[in-house]
């Protein structure tokens, strides 16, 4: 009996010892450098700068959120020195930037000592570096999320917060034909874009805001209507042709544009998808173009205002501001007014997809308008 009791107590002691080690290894710890890889190439970190390239602008906004925590009325960050959780320690234009933890940050010092951001990394290289442990964090194209998970990469997905839309060019003859705009809008099979191009990482979009934002997205139809589109197109005299432009460096945009062209042809619409060179020709040679717009706030009014300012001037939309205290009904009416004119045709919503390395702990996918949450992230100690 004594031997059995001793063995039982010994087993409990061993179990408690191992449990204690596991718990202690999971406690947040200070130190270490987060290795980040991005596809964008940044040439300036001037807080007042606004890059024209959408990928560069998005990456800069993430970095600004780490450097400054005070915003201007338009949602951009105010360049107040020392206000953010990190400060610039090293900067090599177009190649990499290292951010060091701000010891005096009013929100409390970050757990990690620094963040090293390598720029210009192709998506396939980012994914490979995550697999082999050379990177701790990288954004993954939504259409690659399933592939990344199958390869064993930890994947974190946000709510849908990037809108892919088709925008007609005001003044072009075919773009000024209401029947032509509506016909193309009706011909598009958004569900097929989500299912086959995005590999189900996204949602069909009928309005300018996702369902989680204002709760009215379900009021906008996303269904394709090839018969109705064909009927509308038949009412247009002559043999018009639509040129749909997409950014030459955007492979996802190209795939979506080519899918739109297939849908258009099924409805009898003559449409060609063509890349837009950089710098863009002026005036535009395309009749419509694909745009990608990211929500800058989780509040619907601010999100819609940012969309209106982000939509190209080529659309010729009413840019009058919404009241500061706009109600849900007013926001919906403004959204409906834009969508019902078919000058802007929402296509799909994309989430942000992140790949995480094995040692990253306490990661929480940010909501719209928030940057990378590296203030609360910590790194697991390497096994001895």
Image: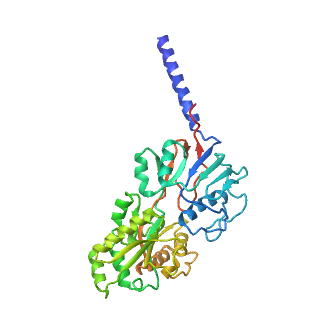
Quarter of the figure with the C terminus: top right
Determine the residue positioned at 52% across, 72% down: 307
Of 230 and 276, nearer the camera is 276
Residue 86 visible at all: no
Q: How is the image coloured?
A: rainbow
**Horizontal relation, residue 111 to residue 216: left or right:** right
Q: Residue furthest bottom?
A: 237
Which quarter of the picture shows residue 92? Answer: bottom right
Q: Residue 295: percent from the left, percent from the top? A: 52, 66
Compared with 94, 319 (above or below) is below
Q: Residue 326: percent from the left, percent from the top? A: 54, 75
Which quarter of the picture shows residue 216? Answer: bottom left
Of 73 and 80, nearer the camera is 80
**Horizontal relation, residue 323 to residue 141: left or right:** right
Q: Residue 87: percent from the left, percent from the top? A: 69, 54
Compared with 331, 203 (above or below) is above
Determine the residue positioned at 37% across, 74% down: 272
Residue 383 visible at all: yes
Q: Residue 265: percent from the left, percent from the top? A: 30, 74
Determine the residue positioned at 49% across, 75% down: 331
Compared with 83, 233 (above or below) is below
**Horizontal relation, residue 258 to residue 209: left or right:** left
Tell how many labels. Answer: 0
């Amino acid at each position: 009996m004594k031997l059995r009791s001793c063995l039982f107590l010994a087993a409990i002691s061993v179990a408690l010892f191992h449990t204690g080690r596991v718990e202690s290894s999971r406690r947040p710890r200070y130190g270490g450098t987060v290795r980040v890889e991005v596809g964008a190439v940044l040439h300036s970190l001037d807080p007042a700068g606004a890059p024209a390239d959408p990928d560069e602008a998005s990456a800069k906004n993430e970095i600004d959120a780490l450097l400054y925590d005070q915003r201007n009325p338009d949602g951009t960050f105010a360049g107040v020195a020392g206000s953010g959780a990190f400060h610039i320690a090293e900067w090599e234009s177009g190649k990499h930037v290292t951010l060091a933890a701000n010891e005096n940050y009013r929100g409390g010092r970050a757990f990690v000592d620094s963040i090293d951001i390598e720029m210009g990394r192709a998506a396939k290289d980012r994914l490979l570096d995550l697999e082999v442990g050379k990177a701790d964090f990288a954004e993954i194209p939504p259409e690659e999320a399933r592939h990344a998970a199958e390869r064993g990469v930890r994947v974190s997905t946000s709510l849908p917060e990037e809108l892919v839309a088709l925008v007609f060019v005001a003044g072009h003859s075919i773009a000024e034909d209401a029947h032509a705009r509506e016909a193309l809008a009706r011909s598009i099979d958004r569900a097929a874009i989500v299912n086959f191009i995005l590999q189900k990482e996204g949602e069909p979009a009928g309005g300018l805001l996702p369902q989680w934002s204002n709760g009215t997205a379900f009021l906008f139809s996303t269904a394709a209507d090839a018969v109705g589109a064909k009927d509308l197109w038949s009412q247009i005299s002559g043999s018009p042709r639509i040129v749909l432009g997409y950014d030459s460096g955007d492979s996802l945009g190209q795939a979506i544009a080519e899918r739109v062209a297939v849908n258009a042809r099924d409805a009898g619409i003559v449409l060609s998808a063509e890349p837009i060179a950089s710098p863009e020709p002026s005036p535009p040679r395309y009749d419509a173009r694909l745009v990608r717009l990211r929500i800058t706030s989780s509040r619907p009014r601010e999100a819609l205002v940012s969309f209106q300012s982000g939509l190209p001037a080529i659309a010729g939309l009413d840019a009058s501001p919404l009241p500061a205290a706009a109600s849900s009904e007013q926001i919906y009416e403004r959204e409906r007014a834009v969508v019902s004119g078919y000058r802007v045709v929402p296509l799909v919503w994309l989430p942000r997809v992140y790949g995480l390395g094995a040692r990253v702990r306490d990661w929480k996918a940010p909501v719209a308008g928030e940057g990378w949450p590296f203030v609360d992230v910590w790194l697991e100690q390497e096994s001895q």
